Image: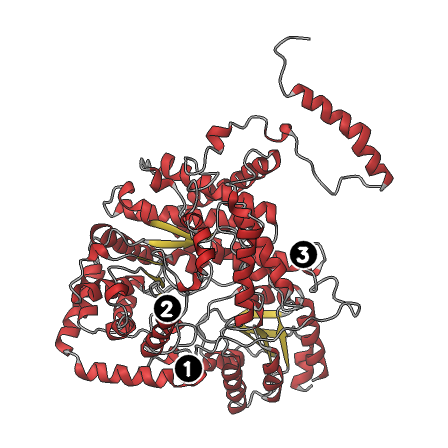
């Protein structure tokens, strides 16, 4: 025997002996050819360099976490003593996500919320009419105005929502979130014009527009123009924000939307990273230094399944892939450019919830909260258990969701350790595995020409819907089990029903009349505004849209200032850019 | 030979449709793939269809079934418009089924307006194809 033998040799010998003496006997006893469980020894990742692949939290490659601890963790004990409610926002954050009806309805709702204790800025959901670039009087608007968010037809609507946001709630003090994609340039321009009219310097504005148009082609579907032209608008926003609104985040990239649409874990990761790469490239093509804007690129969340180990590994792999991509491919130098900033880490995804025995969804969401707490995020329990029952969550479901997160933080103390799985033979091997498979898929997309080409050809969209169908077949063949859906659903089980009183803040009577009230305002706007200024602003937008080298933000700001409607701007761009047509299924 | 008998001999044609602006397509895609694999002729409308467009496509494509996928909460008014549109165009023989996020209390309302069946989350695609086969052969 040689003195400097392979240090893994003793594990290899031990593993062989274990297999022969213990595992094989057990398999024989149960007449199995393969073990239903796995065990990971040091052999699982024997070549791994901990510092290179994991490192400390807040250090490249950020596998162990983007920060040594999150900001919320610094205040967790105070929050418990003060009875802080996260839906009110605070600590520089936005309040609860929402929006409905006309701008006036949503403004009044926000005023009521602030009277109750909300301190954070608006966190806006827009109706589908706005998201798809139409006005409330369009044929497409019928029945949709103010339904899944607030209706914005012009700057006047936007300014109405901000009426309560003065003084301590001024837009130089509280941030805003805008869940808007295709018309993101218009909403950002409205925010800039609002500040300008109030005499607030643009560099004081904080907030996050979603502005992740590429995932809209793959999931969610609120695209307007073809991918290339959409990315040009992204470039214009990116350059404008970096130069004039440096505190505003540029976007919030969503992996989980793609996952909800059916993507596998690796597709979720690869597609959202390919999208992120396309945005970075667009900024660089716009003449920006990568470190001047990459720190303002944010992520919403990755993930969305009940598989707790894999979801933890996914978060770790995502942080590492992104860090390496920014450093190695895009030559970033600032570590902040390389770190994933996201409000949510792991979660189960709404798609994991079931209509059958819906209280089980609370149990499911707690598993997601555990995964989040063990992968560098707040152990957020999401969604409320009544998610699959219809639009809106009941007050009880929301309360239990909040409490479950609190129980994980304060009683189970899940968030007291950073990356508790670091160095686990199993978790490191799983993280490597997910990283390798996602990276292979990313390389495939790069070979196609990147995210834009992979969307134009329909590759990503087809891959996602095929994965969704594959998953459905697995459930129907009982290769995957969903409790109460394809197993444990016979007469021996009892149904557990829940009361469901949806939050009354969204008045159904107001919703009914929202369409009519928005249309009345539009008529008035078109009577009152300076029509010459409108047509000259629109012609400038059109002329410059044809010249790819021009940044359109200046023209869009000019349109906004002159009360041009959202659809009028989008229509002009539709004429020049065309509209995206999804390829056949 | 009458028209119905001829129809029996050809593949059952299904239009899977997404009315309104909602872009959540997973359910529509899965059902379209599943019905195609079950031997039906499936046409998928794609996103952002008005109810009028859906009725027209159904008639032009000579389908036997329209499957509406609705997750936006607007299922009552959208289904009503499709059914009325079919009536106006004398195409009431096309049966309408609905899938999506449909609260339980709305299911009887949909059936009262003429929707043949409502399939909510967790339904196997095989249940939908079985329902269609049974409904068309009994027509």
| Residue identified by numbered label 1 | A511
Quadrant assignment, res A34: top right
Q: Nearer the viewer, mark 2 or mark 3?
A: 2
Label 1 in the same subunit as label 3: yes
Q: Is residue A478 left or right of residue A55?
A: right
Q: Position of residue A261 (x, y in %)?
A: 52, 60
Q: Nearer the viewer, mark 1 or mark 3?
A: 1
Residue A474's tag is 3
| Residue identified by numbered label 2 | A131
Disc with the residue nearer the chain's start (1 vs 2): 2
For mark 3, give the secondary structure.
helix
Separation (CA) of disc 1 from disc 2: 18 Å
* CA neighbours of label 3 inside 10 A, class few (<14), some (14 to 19), many (20+): few
Quadrant assignment, res A489: bottom right
Q: Which chain does the residue under circle 3 lie in? A: A
Q: Position of residue B16 (x, y in %)?
A: 55, 72
Separation (CA) of disc 2 from disc 3: 34 Å
């Amino acid at each position: 025997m040689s003195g400097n033998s392979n240090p893994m040799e003793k594990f290899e010998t031990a593993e062989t002996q274990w297999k022969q003496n213990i595992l094989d006997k057990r398999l024989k006893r149960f007449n199995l050819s393969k073990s239903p469980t796995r065990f990971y020894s040091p052999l699982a990742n024997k070549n791994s360099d901990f510092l290179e692949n994991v490192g400390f939290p807040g250090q490249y490659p950020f596998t162990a976490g983007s920060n040594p601890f999150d900001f919320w963790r610094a205040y967790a004990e105070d929050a418990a003593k003060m009875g802080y409610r996260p839906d009110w926002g605070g600590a520089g954050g936005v309040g609860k996500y929402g929006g409905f009806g006309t701008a006036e309805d949503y403004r009044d709702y926000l005023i009521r919320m602030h009277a109750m204790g909300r301190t954070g800025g608006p966190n806006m959901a827009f109706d589908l009419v706005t998201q798809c670039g139409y006005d409330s009087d369009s044929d497409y608007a019928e029945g949709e105005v103010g339904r899944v968010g607030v209706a914005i037809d012009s700057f006047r609507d936007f300014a109405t929502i901000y009426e309560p946001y003065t003084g301590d709630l001024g837009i130089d003090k509280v941030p805003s979130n805008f869940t808007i994609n295709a018309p993101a340039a218009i909403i950002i321009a409205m925010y800039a014009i609002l500040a300008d009219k109030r005499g607030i310097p643009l560099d004081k504005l904080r907030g996050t527009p979603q502005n992740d148009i590429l995932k809209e082609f793959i999931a969610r579907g609120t695209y307007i123009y073809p991918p290339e032209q959409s990315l040009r608008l992204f470039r214009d926003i990116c350059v404008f924000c970096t130069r004039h609104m440096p505190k505003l985040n540029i976007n919030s990239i969503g992996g989980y939307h793609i996952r909800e649409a059916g993507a596998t874990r690796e597709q979720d990761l690869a597609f959202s990273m390919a999208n992120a790469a396309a945005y970075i490239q667009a900024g660089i093509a716009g003449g920006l230094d990568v470190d001047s804007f990459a720190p303002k690129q944010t992520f919403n969340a990755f993930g969305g399944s009940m598989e707790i180990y894999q979801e933890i590994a996914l978060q770790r792999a995502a942080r590492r892939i992104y860090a390496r991509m920014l450093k190695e491919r895009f030559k970033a130098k600032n570590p902040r450019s390389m770190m994933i900033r996201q409000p949510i880490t792991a979660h189960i995804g709404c798609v994991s919830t079931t209509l059958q025995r819906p209280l089980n969804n609370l149990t499911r969401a707690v598993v997601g909260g555990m995964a989040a707490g063990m992968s560098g995020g707040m152990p957020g329990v999401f969604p409320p258990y009544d998610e699959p029952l219809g639009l809106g969550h009941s007050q009880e479901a929301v309360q239990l969701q909040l409490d479950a997160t609190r129980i994980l933080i304060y009683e189970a103390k899940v968030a007291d350790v950073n990356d508790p799985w670091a160095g686990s033979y199993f978790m490191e091997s799983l993280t490597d595995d997910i990283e390798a498979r996602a990276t292979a898929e990313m390389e495939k997309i790069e070979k196609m020409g990147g995210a834009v080409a992979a969307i134009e050809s329909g590759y990503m969209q087809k891959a996602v819907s095929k994965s969704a169908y594959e998953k459905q077949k697995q459930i129907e063949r009982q290769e995957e089990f969903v409790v109460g859906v394809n197993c444990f659903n016979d007469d021996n089980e009892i149904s557990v029903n829940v009361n469901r009183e949806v939050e009354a803040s969204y008045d159904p009577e107001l919703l009914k009349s929202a369409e009519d009230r928005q249309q009345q305002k539009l008529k008035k706007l078109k009577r009152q505004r300076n029509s010459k200024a409108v047509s000259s602003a629109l012609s400038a937008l059109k002329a410059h849209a044809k010249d790819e080298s021009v940044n359109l933000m200046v023209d869009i700001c000019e349109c906004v200032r002159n009360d041009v409607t959202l659809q009028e701007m989008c229509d002009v761009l539709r004429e020049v850019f065309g509209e995206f047509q999804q390829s056949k299924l | 030979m009458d028209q119905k008998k001829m129809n029996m001999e050809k593949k059952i044609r299904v239009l899977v449709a997404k009315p309104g602006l909602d872009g959540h397509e997973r359910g529509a895609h899965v059902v379209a793939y599943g019905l195609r694999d079950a031997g039906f002729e499936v046409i998928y409308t794609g996103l952002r269809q008005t109810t009028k467009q859906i009725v027209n496509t159904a008639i032009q494509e000579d389908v036997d079934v329209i499957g509406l996928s609705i997750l936006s909460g607007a299922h009552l008014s959208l289904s009503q418009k499709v059914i009325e549109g079919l009536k106006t165009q004398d195409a009431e023989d096309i049966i309408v089924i609905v899938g999506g996020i449909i609260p339980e209390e709305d299911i009887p309302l949909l059936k009262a307006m003429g929707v043949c069946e409502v399939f909510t989350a967790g339904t196997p695609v095989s249940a939908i194809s079985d329902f269609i086969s049974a409904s068309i052969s009994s027509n």
